[in-house]
Image: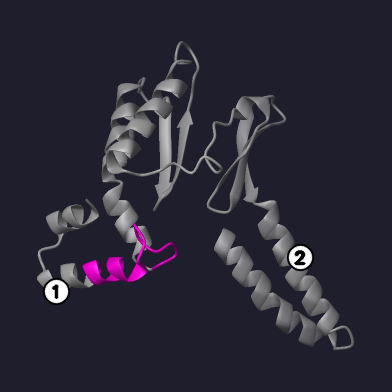
Amino acid sequence: MLLAKVARRVNDDDVMHLLKMVLKANGERGVPQGGVLSPVLSNLYLNEVDRMLERAREVTREKVRTHVQYARYADDLVVLVDPTRGYAWLEGAVVRRLREELGKLGVEVNEEKSRVADLTKGEAFGFLGFEFRQIPTKTGKRRPRYVPKLKKRTALLRKLKEEFRRHVSQPVDRVIRVINPILRGWVAHFR
């Protein structure tokens, strides 16, 4: 199915042959996780899921307000449902339709990573290394808050602590030269 989707867009026998070799080299079904082709092929393969979610967004639109939004990066997907004013049924319908569409493609949902989170009840969800939740503002409204996941923050602190220990008797300017690239890289990644 993947090769057929690629063949609709790529009209080069050499590229198709190379892609077949890459897929066979893994020895398993699917694209090697973390491979350079994985995000590109995921985007091609999951186009129908995007189309289904785009239709859901348009069907539930009320003027400028939408009751369904989504974000997908390669094979990571988050669907946001606003169940206000008579749209409470939408959450179950979106989950059901999403599973149907993924089933047609032969994609298995990772049940350990997949769940429904109710942000109005203080629950959070993770996406692309960030944790998302809603927090109240000073005016009483709610706004999104997103921070790098705790695991990523503690890994940074562990790395910094190691560098501080290693350079304990070094001049401060030398420690700063060691630490700054680590901090700049981390901030650039999560910005």
Is residue 64 positioned above or below 108 on the image? above
**Please, what is the three-letter code of the amino acid marked with disc 1?**
Asp
Asked whether, in this view, residue 22 is left or right of residue 154, the answer is left
What's drawn in magenta, residue-wise? 19-35
User: Which residue is pictured at 65% across the width and 77% down the height?
Assistant: 181
Q: Secondary structure at mark 2?
A: helix
Q: Type of residue at label 2?
A: Leu
> How far separated are the C-alphas under marks 2 and 1?
47 Å
Q: Which mark is on residue 14?
A: 1
Is 142 on the left or on the right of 49, as rendered? right
- Residue 101 as seen in the image, left or right of residue 77: left
Q: Position of residue 62 (x, y in %)?
A: 36, 20
> Reading the chain from its start, which is encountered first: label 2 or label 1?
1
Q: Residue at (31%, 46%) from the top-left corner?
A: 46
State the image quarter where residue 61 is shown. top left
Tell me residue 100's x, y (percent).
Answer: 33, 31
Instruction: Using the image, tell me which numbered label, if any, was put on residue 157.
Output: 2
